[in-house]
Amino acid sequence: MKDMKRPMTTAEYFDLICGNLRKKNRMPDDMLDYALAAFSPVPILTYEFDIRNNLDYGGSEGIYLDIAIEVCEHGKRVCRSLGTFKTLQTSPEAMRTMAQLLADFILEERAYVNSHLDDFTWTGADVYAVREDGTRTGWGYSCCSMEAAIKRKDELLGKYSIVVIRDNASRKEKHYLSGGNVGLD
């Protein structure tokens, strides 16, 4: 069940992943000028995002690594900044180290999301079937709207006797029983 009471922001996520990298000695702090989270953080409402990055030499100094997430909002793909790493160094070795930092960041953030999916699920509804003994089946759907969830619920009730719809924003669940009966919430 969900531990978080609100969605994590892009800045909080950047800082969390940086902290995890430091704990694992994967952050090249000795060469970084800074690791700075986004100035205008926004909530992360879904785990369905892609990491985008720009690793390049700065216009006047050093090497920059900008990291963002790309999400679908209102039917459009948009990028939301997570943060920036900067070093004043410009050597080929520094570029390789920054590239390694990028790879480590991606590996760490993907592992974190995969083990904390519910912390990144704040929109839509989940629909899943429950066995007679109360255990979840492996069958279910993530839906963008409650209307879509109700349609999926009806499909599952044709195969299973108990189906649950979970509103991801409120975390409230409603249990449905085959035969049109509504069970306990």
Image (spheres, grey):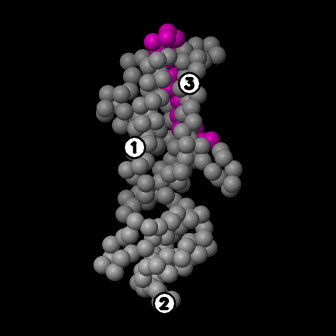
What quarter of the picture does the N terminus occupy? bottom left
Q: Amino acid at mark 1?
A: Ala
Query: In x, y percent, where is residue 100?
Result: 44, 24
Q: Residue furthest top?
A: 91
- Of residues 138 and 36, the one nearer the viewer is 138
Secondary element under disc 1, as helix, strand or loop, is: helix
* Res 104 → quadrant: top left
Looking at the picture, does residue 63 appear above or below residue 145? above
How many other residues sit within 10 Å of disc 1, few (<14), some (14-19) or many (≥20)?
Answer: few
Residue 38 appears in view: no
Residue type indicated by callout 3: Leu
Q: Residue tagged by mark 1?
A: 111
- For the residues labelled 3 and 1, the Cα–Cα distance comes to 22 Å
Q: Which residue is mark 2?
A: 179
Work out whether residue 58 or residue 145 is closer to the camera in this orientation and state it: 145
Residue 67 percent location from the top left of the image: 54, 33
Dot 2: element: loop
Q: Earlier in the sequence, mark 1 or mark 2?
A: 1
* Residue 53, image x, y percentages: 56, 32
In the rendered structure, find residue 17 and report the number of the disc placed on it.
none
Instruction: Kindly check if marks 3 and 1 are in contact, taking CB atoms under 8 A apart as contact.
Output: no
**Residue stretch in magenta:** 79-94
Residue lying at 47% horizontally and 29% vertically, measured from the top left: 102
N-terminal label among 3 and 2: 3
Q: Are marks 3 and 2 in contact (CB under 8 Å)?
A: no
Residue with the mark numbered 3: 55
